[in-house]
Amino acid sequence: MTTSAVPSTILIAEDDPLIREVTEESLRAEGYRVVAAENGEEAFEILQRMKPDLILSDVRMPRCDGFELLRRVRCADGYRATPFIIMSAKTETSDQRMGMSLGADDYVTKPYFTGDLLKTIEVRLARAALVNERVRLHQQFLTRVLPHELRTPLAGIIGYADLMVLLGECGDTLTSKDLLDYGQNIGRSGQRLLSVAEDFSLWAILEAAKAEGQRAGGVKLKDTQIKAEWLRQCCEKIIVQYAREGDLVIEGPPATVTVPEDGLERVISHLVENAFKFSLPGAPVRVKIGGDAKVCEIQVIDQGRGMSEGDPEKFRIMCQFDREKFEQQGLGMGLGLAQSFALLGGGDFTLVRNAPAPGMTACLQLGRAGG
């Protein structure tokens, strides 16, 4: 059933008038807008005037059959991602295979139960809505967030460089205080750019590892020891950046984990940075090493303003968590990187409220070496 404020539009291509009429009535009864065509040629002509949310097509039709319609749709700009469901007789399994190989999203067999058809349509529309939302978020990221994260530090670097050139052209010199100030600001801008580059580099490494793992049945893992000194070293730059030297508390015994070769240090620093970012100076941020004989849990616990609990679907790369509530600096890649890293090593990542206490707990679960 369509639940959006604007009903979804479905294009039906079916040459049998009885099946076409029954299908139209069933879909309209569920709240869908329906446009019907007697064959693939007529359906493609309709596509020149309007864009449906889903196409439902028979295979055996005169003039232009369902396969040819599917080929045309998948080659047309703006329709490559439009859900396409083929209908074929139950005995024609070759039709189903051919349709799926050409890019159909699903198929239903005729004669079909109305409930099965409606469920298939509902699932495919929901899937398309999810994909469209991800595309929208990525477009927003590429057009708004990324340019801002690149231009802001670059503007600082270029601005100070221009000032230094201008002073040189005028024959002036900088005082020691000015040199220190200029150098510190240029350094901060450079570090911000470096952080962007490192995030994208880690994302590319994890994606490549994921693809390689799917082909070869595993990813490259290594044993890494986690202890208090190492954790503090991972977070040193973050501590200095936020001037929170006394706020980081590390607890728990050392542990050796088996994890992907790259990324653990950056993942942990991201989680600690989030804890600092969303809490006030003076409020402790605790990093606890725990777990059991098989799983090591690294918990990062803050006393900040809190966020929504961690629905895994929200941990997307290039999407700032709860951005609609809180605007903040950064690419929004930290939680997504943490989840990808943990899953590649056979672990998990969760984010939960500390209720009734304030703040959040980010929990990175990693497999212990030999566990």
Image (cartoon, rainbow, N blue to C red):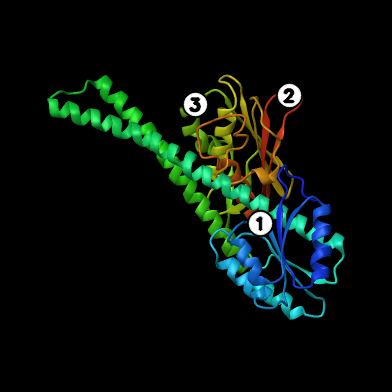
Q: Mark 2 falls on what kind of element?
A: loop
Query: Within the image, what quadrant is residue 283 found in?
Result: top right
Structural distance between the alpha carbons of marks 1 and 3:
51 Å
User: Which residue matches tag 1?
Assistant: 52
Whether label 1 touches label 2, CB < 8 Å: no
Structural distance between the alpha carbons of marks 1 and 2:
49 Å
Structural distance between the alpha carbons of marks 2 and 3:
23 Å
Q: Does residue 233 sit above or below 78 in this rendering?
A: above
First reached walking from the N terminus: tag 1 or tag 3: 1
Q: Is residue 331 left or right of residue 103?
A: left
Query: Within the image, what quadrant is residue 190 found in?
Result: top left
Callout 3: 10 Å neighbours few (<14), some, many (20+)?
few
Q: How many marks?
A: 3
First reached walking from the N terminus: tag 2 or tag 3: 3
User: Which residue matches tag 2?
Assistant: 357
User: Which residue matches tag 3?
Assistant: 242
Callout 2: 10 Å neighbours few (<14), some, many (20+)?
few
Q: Residue at x 85, y 72 (%)?
A: 111
